[in-house]
Image (cartoon, helix red, strand yellow):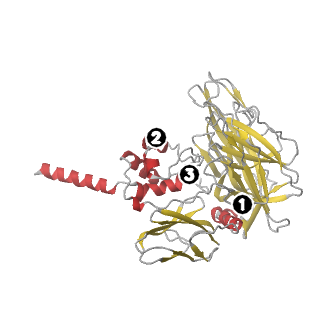
Amino acid sequence: MKKHLLLFSFLFFLGNFLFSQATWSDDVAQIFYDKCSKCHRSGGAGGFSLVTYQEASSLASFLYDQVNTNEMPPWPPDNNYMEYAHDRALTPTEKTTVLSWLSSGTPEGDPANTPPPPVFNSGSILGNGDLEIQMPAYTSQATSTADDYTCFTIPSGLTQDRVIKAIEVIPGNEAIVHHALIYVDSVPLNSPTDSLGSQCITPSSNTASLACGFAPGAVPTIFPSQDPLKMGVHMRANSQVIFAMHYPEGSFGQSDSTKVIFHFYPPGEPGVRDVFALPLLQNWTFSLPPEQVTSVSASYSISSNYPDLSFISVFPHMHLIGDNMKVYGLKPNQDSIRMINVPHWDFEWQDFYYFKNMKHVPPGTTVKADAVYDNTSGNIHNPNSPPATITAGFNTADEMLVVYFHLMQYQAGDENYNMDSLMNLTFADIIENNIEPSNLFVYPNPFDKDLNIHCQGLSPGDNVTAYIYDFNGKKVKELLKNRIVQNEVLQINWDAKTDRGVEVNAGLYYISFSVNGVISHQKVIKR
């Protein structure tokens, strides 16, 4: 009798496990849409698509290794150390769900339950700006074992000083642009083009200032430009724009012509606070002996005569043998200001990381970076075999310890601003005049509290699903799922709230609408 009871209990447990296991349609597809498909889609920088069940399930073992080791999705910062805007890391629950699905045979579930995918822009998100600079067509010289790093310097043609409120990098060939660093040099002819040696990681000019970075999955650089906070970066007349491009191994023979679009404030716009992009932390004197793991630091003391500062973002930079880096501030009373911790440095993934809330840095604070370099033969990224002494320098095989910050003069309350919300306000303002027509009729658009979605031309019995996504491709709201309509017209209302009942920030959103599996989209703007 006990054996029968044990067998029954086991079968009951097994049945519950199988019944509750994750499926693509009900659990996993949305995670892939939110965290993977922005890069891994047709024509995307990820090299292969992960939008459909067939695409994802066919790569199960490969994806398991990538997710289990946190290689994908790429997000170097430690989120337990600091929170950032536009975080694209998997949450612990999402990671567990994906790994469980991959290890249990990748069940699809009911295909009808698969949510409609988000919208992915193949070109500009922000639309036409005030200044567009495009680098000349370039054919990648990367080999099957070595990446290609090259720099192009283009005159801006600006005839007067302007203030930048947003910058967008548009890869000419998304599939091969691994990352791009965009610099602005106010000194003409100080940063010559270097596209011959395939080793230009950063421009050699000491007057070039890093304006923004691009990596697959990144969003445009946007500064708040609406009351109560306006901020921007000055760009001088006759400046040069420098493209520091990275093309990965295996891209040999493929062409690219990346461009950058600048959005400026109107000349004389009042109330704009100056933002500076400064490499406060630098160390150019270190030497890394072979077969050693070496710790290196850099520090910068903010004079007690300076005004208080607000730190907006942080951009840590090392080269190939960097192992980890932590950046922080020590106030005069020795309280710490956390900025970023990168426990596993990966040269191929670097960006400006915008704090969710700006950091108040008072006078007398010392800003520090503690970095570790692994110059051993066990480091697969080591450019030398056998290892050799490496010193600081601009070439790929050299090393660097540089940390950029966006910062400005502090005003009371800066640390309380929600940067996600304020950047979305700017986003909405820029793209308000770039709304395309659709087979959906939505009104009012832009909207404040309620959005009406009107779809006609349906037939009784049609299966309709409608989701709301943000401009990063993350799900915001499930409006309806598998609704079998009885009429030729369907009216839906969105109250501008998420699935959890929280009102969304102002900004750009997409309606993804499925009728019997046929997808359509519409941009909408929340004011």
**N-terminal-most mark, 1 or 2:** 2
Q: Nearer the viewer, mark 1 or mark 2?
A: 2
Please tell me whether mark 1 sits on a helix, a strand or a loop. loop
Tell which of 447 and 84 is nearer to you. 447
Q: Which residue is mark 2?
A: 62
| Residue 69 against residue 396 in the figure, above or below | below
Among the 4 quarters of the image, the one containing residue 190: top right
Q: CA distance from mark 3 to mark 2?
A: 25 Å
Please state which amino acid type lies under the numbered disc 1: Phe
Q: Which residue is mark 3?
A: 79
* Contact flag, marks 1 and 3 (Cβ < 8 Å): no
Q: How many marks?
A: 3
Please state which amino acid type lies under the numbered disc 3: Asn
Q: CA distance from mark 1 to mark 2?
A: 38 Å
Residue 201 visible in the snapshot: no
What residue is rendered at 47% in x and 77% in y?
488
Q: Which residue is mark 1?
A: 223
Please tell me whether mark 2 sits on a helix, a strand or a loop. helix
Q: Residue 350, percent across and down?
A: 64, 45
Residue 380 visible in the snapshot: yes
